[in-house]
Image (tube, grey):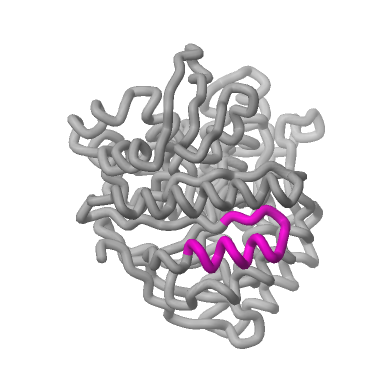
Amino acid sequence: MPVTFELQHIDEASGARAGLLHTPHGDVKTPVFMPVGTCATVKTMTVEELRALGAQIILSNTYHLYLRPGHDLIKEAGGLHAFMHWDGPILTDSGGFQIFSLAELRKLSADGAEFASHIDGSRHHFTPEKVMEIEMALSSDIAMCFDECSPYPADFERVRQADKHTFSWAQRCKAAHQHPRQGLFGIIQGGTYPELRAQSARDIISLDFPGYGIGGLSVGEPKPLMYEILEQLTPLMPQHKPRYLMGVGSPDCLFEGVARGVDMFDCVLPTRIARNGTVMVPEGKLVIRNAEYARDFRPIQEDCDCYACRNYSRAYIRHLIKCDEILGIRLTTIHNLHYLCHLMQDIRQSIFDGGFNALRQEFWARYQQ
């Protein structure tokens, strides 16, 4: 199999896991946060900068790359790695969440999804087979099955129907997937209904994928409810295969996800808030564009060794952002991604050392949501 997982250690006190994800473009140390490069770029960042701050694997978006520049063009360029000049592992999502987000612009059926492009309104049709065609052309290391994500809140029958589609589409994805150097992960849905989560887990796991996404969370439900779902779900998942909590990336959720046995995470949060002048620090969030930092000549975070903190002050970065200078959001992006990647490195080491719970308690003693 092109993608395999080696479970290296489980922290007995918490259940947190450390492992190695083996891919055609290198190994990934887990638990891991994956920066999101929606359109074949992590916004404002070069791949060399991503490597320097500790990124191991990045995520790109099937829906967006299908619309532009088109998967055929990327295939002609030699695949996504060559196209974007990134030689490390890449995971591509299926576009299911983006289509879910289109709301009034899409129509779902047992066959797939019809939707209008958010760019020009043109009509398109995604089936599981079409999504596999696109992801195989992109030639990512890990492709995700096409799924239907339920909104929150949603009634039981609405979620049950979405789960039926997700299982049927996963079967069709597996049958259509033929890329010899690409692993295909299934996605477990089920909303916030424990019995539907358990049934979706049984269905998707029965197809024996090399890894499993946990979808349909972080879509508006309270965080304690998400944690309850994870506590119920992860014990049902295979121990020696990676568990990927999709669309989750705030520091508190990373700690709590790892504590519940999750190995992989991704989210646009660190880059999105960076573009709004907000940075992540151990105490929570610091809105560096605020006036109180106009004469603050300290780095963003005193003990951080990222490029931004080594070289620039809060006052200078605030000035850049207030002037709409691109360097400002590049520096906040560098810091946020560095912060999360190094947080995950510290979490991983604490699992090996038997100190995860202590690190988690230390985090919560400082962190303000």
Residue occupying image coordinates x 63% and y 77%: 356
Which residue in the rendered view is the most extreme toward the bottom? 12
Q: Main secondary structure of the magenta part?
A: helix
Whether residue 285 is visible here, answered yes or no, is yes
How many numbered markers are drawn? 0
Residue 187 in the image, given as x and y percentages of width and height? 50, 55
Give whichever of 125, 332 is nearer the camera.
125
Which residue in the rendered view is the most extreme toward the top? 120
Q: Eyeballing the image, is 305 above or below 75?
A: below
Residue occupying image coordinates x 37% and y 71%: 5
Bounds of the magenta span? 189-204
Q: Eyeballing the image, is 240 above or below 251?
A: below
Give whichever of 128, 284 is nearer the camera.
128
Give whichever of 217, 347 is nearer the camera.
217
Residue occupying image coordinates x 80% and y 67%: 365
Give whichever of 157, 276 is nearer the camera.
157
Whether residue 338 is visible here, answered yes or no, is no
Image quarter (top left, top right, bottom left or bottom right) of the N terminus? bottom left
Q: Eyeballing the image, is 338 above or below 38?
A: below
Residue 103 in the image, given as x and y percentages of width and height? 63, 28
Residue 343 in the image, given as x and y percentages of width and height? 57, 61
In this picture, residue 294 sits left or right of residue 215: right
Question: Residue 196, located in which quarter of the rendered image?
Answer: bottom right
Residue occupying image coordinates x 42% and y 33%: 126
Q: Eyeballing the image, is 148 above or below 328?
A: below
Residue 221 in the image, given as x and y percentages of width and height? 76, 49
Is 120 one of the magenta-colored residues?
no
